[in-house]
Image: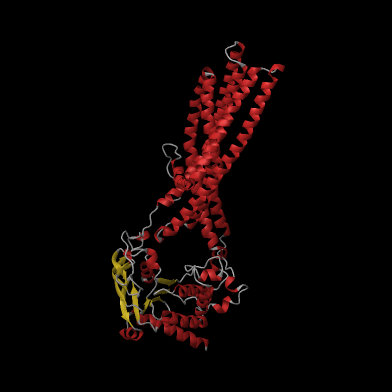
Amino acid sequence: MSQAEPVKPRISLKPLLALLPFLMHYKGRVYGAIAALVAAAGLTLVLPVALRQMIDLGFDAGSAAAIDQYFLVIILVGGALAVASASRYYLVMWIGERAVAELRSAVFRHLTELSPSFFDKTRSGEIISRLSADTTLIKSAFGASASIAMRQVLLLIGAAGMMVVTSPKLSAIVLLAIPLVVLPLIAFGRSVRQRSRTAQDSLADALAYATEALGAVRTLQAFTAEKQVSDRFENDTQTAFSAAIFATRARSILIATIMLVVTLSIVSVLWIGALSVIDGTMSGGELTQFLIYSIMAAGGVSSLAQVWGELSQAAGAAERLSELLAIEPDIAEPSTPQHFAGAVRGAIAFEGVGFSYPTSTSLSVLENISLHIRNGENVAIVGPSGAGKSTLFQLLMRFYDPSEGRITLDGKDLTSLPLHELRDQIALVPQDTAIFAMSVADNIAYGSPHASREDVERAGKLARADEFIVKMEEGYDTIIGERGFTLSGGQRQRIAIARAILKDAPVLLLDEATSALDAESETLVQTALEELMKGRTTLVIAHRLATVLKADRIIVMENGGIVESGTHASLIQKGGLYAKLARMQFDSGNAAMQNSD
């Protein structure tokens, strides 16, 4: 996503059209802005006519009354122009700010709905760059720059028309300069847009790397990698700087070329016009009027040359955001969804399930998994690392779909259920607990925003998290630092357990839920979990076999398949993989106890 695209055959502002749907939410303000824009341009074009009449009338005592009237008209026109210009600026800026805010929200909302497979291959820092840097570019261009561009276009058209009406001969001279202005605009515009896109992509790479590095700052400093990381970030930002400077240089040359052409055309017009006044074929007022209109037109062209570069940058940013909005989730909502008729019981079935992750389709993670779990059953899943245990949870939550076979909940294929309806039936306590930079209460109520404070505190107590929460400075209202670094691993995990308790779902998934707890905390939390498991279908992934001895059934996995199934006692008698794992853990545990004695 972050690699620069090849140079496109022509410049295009078409990506900016993606903003139109957001603008149309405020049609009244859009029409008001257009009306103010037209009024401001029209009033500006009236001023040279009044000035021409005043000059041609002469400056003698007999024309004093008429001159007074002309100046009064000019004052009134100037006042109306000030009001129209201020209204135009306010409305256009408001619309631009509002449209970009909605665009940013729409992109973020779309990102939250994309499948995990998208985030498997996309760096979060690059996404943040698109949400921040790209939308800022669009906001700048679509606000002030778009306002200036629309005003200058109207003035250019109006001034050109009035120039033809005033003097067709002088207008022909100006028309000859138009190709000399347009050609460099097209030639440099394409380069500006491509280099701007390259600069934005390079900046996204730098921000993505910075996000990863700062997110693991403890590891960074532990390995004294400060210089290594800083050098790489500096190289990325230098690449972005070089691309941006190239685009700026191109825009500078473009502006200089256009200003030179415009200046030469105005001088030519003034020269020929002065000779026309001398030979009597043109009045001084007409020349003044034509000159003012030509300056307006020249100013419009010069402004457009500068604004064009900004709009080209915004087009590149809009293109990058449009790419995100165009991505479809790999996990699609069913076209004809089914719904649970009543309360979900929690019966789960894996039927001939095979799976490979999208990032490595050649590597089979699960093969021919067939597993039926009764509602209310407590099933433990054990096995060596890489056996595919966590993948079962990923499929059950429908973060991915099986490559083969199917999975059902209460007899309904997961692919036939609306995603929210499916995931509402499952509470997950992951091994890597996600803690957010907000209050303890908000972290527990994450995903249950309407829960009462009493329910939140009750969940905290059941998860044995209350004992450390009440000792915090503001209790449940204490703001936790980003990613919960101020908490111990056990504290983070107890908050995750409280979050699952509060959700009160019929299916409970515990992925090493007590792995980060010390012996005392593990005993407390295990008691809470046993209470929570009652009446629920529970799947427990565990490496520490001591935590699953009471499971109704233990499923043993190896190399993506199920190799054993039974109770702890029956599996020990079989003498297979489970017995081997148990012997290794329990023997080492006994040895550790003897050594400590």
Picture quadrant of residue 338: bottom left
Q: Is residue 248 among the parts visible in the rendering?
A: no
Question: Which x, y percent locates residue 323?
Answer: 42, 49
Closest to the observer: 135 or 506?
506
Instruction: Work out whether residue 55 can be spotted.
Output: yes
Residue that protrudes farthest toward the right in the picture: 61
Residue located 55% across and 71% down the image: 440
Q: Is residue 367 left or right of residue 281?
A: left
Identify the image quadrant of residue 504. bottom left
Between residue 394 and residue 449, name the one nearer to us: 449
Location of residue 128 with respect to 515 vertically, above or below = above
Between 417 and 45, the one lying in front of the other is 45
Indicate the position of residue 233 as horizontal and vertical percent values. 54, 53
Colour approach in the figure: secondary structure
Q: Is residue 538 left or right of residue 445?
A: left
> Residue 199, how many percent across, how many down?
51, 45
Up the image or down, 205 lies above or below 83; here it is below
Q: Is residue 500 above or below residue 245?
A: below
